[in-house]
Each structure stands twice: as structure tokens, then as C-alpha cells.
Image (cartoon, grey):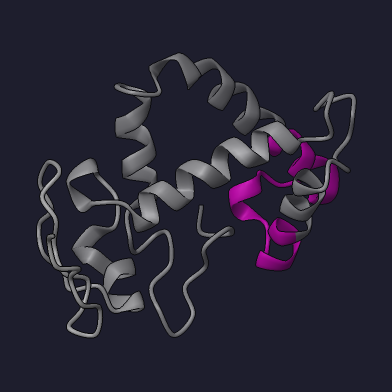
Amino acid sequence: METLIPADQDPGARDASVVNYIDRQLTRKYKKLQPDYRQALAAIDRLARQLRDLPFAQLELDDRTTLMVNLETGKADKQIFSDGGKAAFEMVLAHTMQGFYGNPRHGGNKDYVSWRMIGVPPMPVRGRQHYLVADTFPVPEKS
């Protein structure tokens, strides 16, 4: 996840606890995706071992990025991913974004790191209550 949203001057996926979000969701809403995740992560490790004889987590950032670009563009080994990795990449990217930008009550966006980064006031959001994003965004008047 940190390869997809790396820390720079702002926190990245690791700081936002995105893995925690995905782990929690794989026991709840995305339970049916557990086999897909297991297969995708094992396949990504196989690709990493082909590239540098190391598991993905031990690759340097440039190698991890190259591997992710190959998955994103469907250019990964077709013997490992029949579609070149696009579906696996899109699944992991979507859930990484949800964990990074979503409400912290779901297990990600720890300490509201992404909300702070984009200027959203860190306040709890419950149910369907409406809230102001910032003073610069006026609330439409009810007719």
C-alpha cells in the first residue's frame, strides 16, 4: 500500500494504517475477496522474486514501483496473471484509496492524516450527517 501512496512531505499509506483498514474489511464487507487477495499477494511476491529474487516487501521502491506499473498496465507475466495483473492492481488500489481517504472509524486514515493533508477538518462523521468541509465552502440554503 505504501508503494501506491508513499509518504513524502505528507503521510503515506503506512501512516494512515491502510493495511489495518483492508484487513478489517476482509473480515467484513469484503470477506468474499479473501481468496482473491491471497492469490494476488502470492502472485505479486512471485513477480518480485522473478525480478530480484526477493519478496515484494523487501524490494527497493523503484523495483516495487516498476512492478506496480506493470500490473497497472497489464504487462505483468501472463503465466502468473492471466490479465497481466490489471484486476489485482485495481482491487488493491481501490481499497488502498478507501483506507487512506475514508473515515477513520473503518480502520484506516489513522489520525485523519489524509483529511488533514487536503484541508478537511478532522471531525467524526457518523451516519449520514452533513458537515462543513471548510469555511470556504458555503452550505446551500434550504428552499
In the rendered image, the residue lying farthest to the front is 143
Query: Image height check: is 139 above or below 43?
Result: below
Instruction: Name the side, left or right, on which 69 lies relative to 11.
Output: right
Residue 51 covered by magenta stretch: yes
Front-lying residue, 79 or 119 = 119
Q: At x 56% / y 40%, what residue is drawn?
A: 92
First to last magenta residue range: 44-65
What type of secondary structure mainly makes up the magenta span? helix
Q: Left or right: where does residue 75 sit relative to residue 105?
A: right
> Eyeballing the image, is 140 above or below 66?
below
Query: For the point 23% across and 42% down, which residue is it?
Result: 106
| Residue 114 x/y as whole percent | 34, 67
- State left or right for residue 126 relative to residue 60: left
Measured as percent of width and height from the top left, residue 75 is found at 88, 43
Q: x, y percentage for residue 36? A: 58, 21
The x and y percentages for residue 124 are 10, 57
Residue 123 lies in the magenta stretch: no
What is the count of numbered marks? 0
Q: Is residue 93 left or right of residue 21?
A: right
Among the 4 quarters of the image, the one containing residue 9? bottom left
Query: Which residue shows up at 83% across the image and 28% down it?
Result: 83
- Compared to 3, does 91 lie above or below? above
Q: Quadrant of residue 62?
A: bottom right
Q: Quadrant of the C terminus?
A: bottom left
| Above or below: residue 56 compared with residue 84 | below
